[in-house]
Image (cartoon, grey):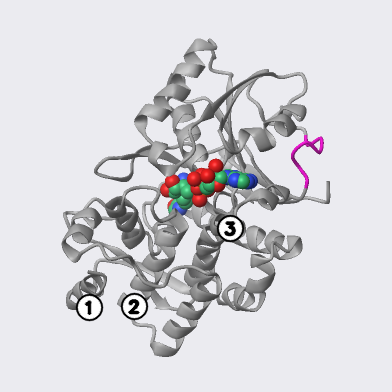
């Protein structure tokens, strides 16, 4: 195990560490002090459990461990799957001092976290994310939930983990397409909050795509630092936290309209970020720069053909909608985002129609 670095999400008495290292799983990291009691339920899936469950179990020496393996895929991020996790907790006679541990990508993390938020009105929760996307985004910040037939992440709860344990080594088995999808959220942080990071990403994209450990460690660290700072300032998304949804109004609608799992979440977010950038007033030079970085990461720059009517209908279920009015995260400039209801309606329709 190489040396780990720690970032703290500052939330008063619910503050927690994000520990980032290479070889942490099975490397003797002591999760014990972060558990609520002496038993836990590990929630994973049929792809990740065969790869990493034994390593995690080895680090839970002396703890009574139950595990459940969910079917793999965004299409299973449903209330029915969350119910199977709750059933498992009930059948193992879990109590309030049981800890739920999510081992997997964002789908596993969102479902497991939601079950932990619901069981006995909330039990302790730990995130062990194994995709780049989950390591830089979904495991941090306490958003948990499942999809509904009418929209993405419509059913959920805020429930913060006690620790986020990020083993960069798990990315060794991650398919390249999933790595690229995670890079979409990494690029998001540069675009909304840190132009120096954006420039670093332009220079280091080949290293990231080549899974260079140092480059990945820095990208994950900087992404988590930005997310931790935003979440600490606005845990429940009363305002500023919504900037983390840059590109997601379009992205979620793409995922919903296509049917979950057709495009990966990160792919939909990449195309959605470019649509949001086009709706912003950032000038052609920066727009081309943004487009070039998305392309360098091997991500789609244009949305799939869906149709403006279906897209607008889906966007109406976005959680930023207030009094039936769409609100967008737009760029004031590349590197700085804002949330606004003001947008050029005809430009929006043009963008949606271009994808017809
Ligand atoms: P995912 O969980 O579906 O994982 C992608 C694929 O990689 C799956 O097939 C998974 O089994 C596999 N996998 C995971 N780790 C692996 C590994 N180390 N080696 C080999 N295969 C591995 O997708 P994701 O991109 O991690 O997460 C997307 C989900 O996260 C979406 O549902 C999205 O809505 C959600 N999300 C939530 C938040 C939040 O704040 N809660 C933020 C962003 C995204
Ligand atoms: N992924 C957006 C958020 O956590 O707020």
Residue range corresponding to the magenta coloring: 23-29
Mark number for residue 155?
none
Mark number for residue 179?
3
Q: In which quarter of the image is residue 124?
A: top right
Q: Which residue is drawn at 37% across and 37% down?
A: 156
- Within 10 Å of disc 3 (Cα), the crowding (few <14, some 14-19, many 20+) is many
- Within 10 Å of disc 1 (Cα), the crowding (few <14, some 14-19, many 20+) is few
Distance in Å between CA atoms under marks 2 and 1: 9 Å
| Residue 114, horizontal then vertical, whole percent | 44, 33
Task: Provide the residue designation for mark 1.
Answer: 347
| Residue 20, horizontal then vertical, whole percent | 71, 50
Decide: is 264 above or below 338. Answer: above
- Drawn side of residue 248 relative to residue 48, left or right: left
Q: Determine whether the residue tagged by mark 1 lies in a helix, strand or loop.
A: helix
Q: Nearer the viewer, residue 312 or 29?
A: 312
Decide: is 257 above or below 214. Answer: above
Q: In which quarter of the image is residue 248?
A: bottom left
């Amino acid at each position: 195990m190489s040396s780990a670095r720690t970032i703290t999400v500052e939330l008063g008495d619910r503050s927690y560490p994000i520990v980032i290292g290479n070889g942490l799983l099975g490397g003797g990291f002591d999760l014990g002090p972060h558990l609520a009691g002496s038993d836990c339920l590990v929630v994973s899936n049929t792809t990740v459990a065969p790869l990493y469950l034994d390593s995690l179990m080895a680090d839970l020496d002396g703890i009574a461990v139950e595990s459940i393996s969910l079917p793999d895929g965004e299409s299973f991020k449903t209330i029915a799957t969350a119910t199977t996790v709750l059933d498992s907790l009930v059948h193992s006679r879990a109590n309030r001092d049981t800890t739920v541990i999510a081992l997997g990508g964002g789908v596993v993390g969102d479902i497991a976290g939601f079950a932990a938020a619901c069981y006995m009105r909330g039990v302790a929760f730990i995130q062990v994310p194994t995709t780049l996307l989950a390591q830089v985004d979904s495991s941090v910040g306490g958003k948990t939930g499942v999809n509904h037939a009418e929209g993405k992440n419509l059913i959920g709860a805020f429930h913060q983990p006690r620790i986020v344990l990020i083993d960069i080594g798990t990315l060794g088995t991650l398919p390249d397409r999933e790595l690229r999808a995670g890079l979409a959220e990494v690029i998001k942080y540069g675009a909304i909050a840190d132009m120096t990071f954006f420039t670093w990403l332009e220079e280091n994209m080949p290293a990231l795509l080549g899974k260079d450990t140092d480059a990945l460690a820095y990208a994950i660290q900087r992404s988590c630092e930005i997310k931790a700072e935003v979440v600490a300032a606005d845990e429940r998304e009363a305002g500023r936290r919504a900037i983390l949804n840059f590109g997601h109004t379009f992205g979620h609608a793409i995922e919903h309209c296509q049917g979950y799992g057709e495009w990966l979440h990160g792919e939909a977010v990449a195309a959605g970020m470019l649509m949001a950038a086009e709706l912003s007033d950032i000038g052609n030079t920066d727009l081309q720069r943004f487009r070039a970085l998305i392309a360098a990461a091997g991500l789609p720059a244009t949305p799939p053909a869906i149709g403006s009517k279906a897209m607008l209908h889906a966007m109406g279920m976005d959680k930023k909608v207030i009094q039936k009015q769409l609100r967008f995260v737009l760029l004031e400039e590349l590197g700085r985002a804002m949330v606004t209801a003001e947008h050029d309606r005809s430009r929006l329709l043009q963008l949606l129609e271009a994808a017809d």
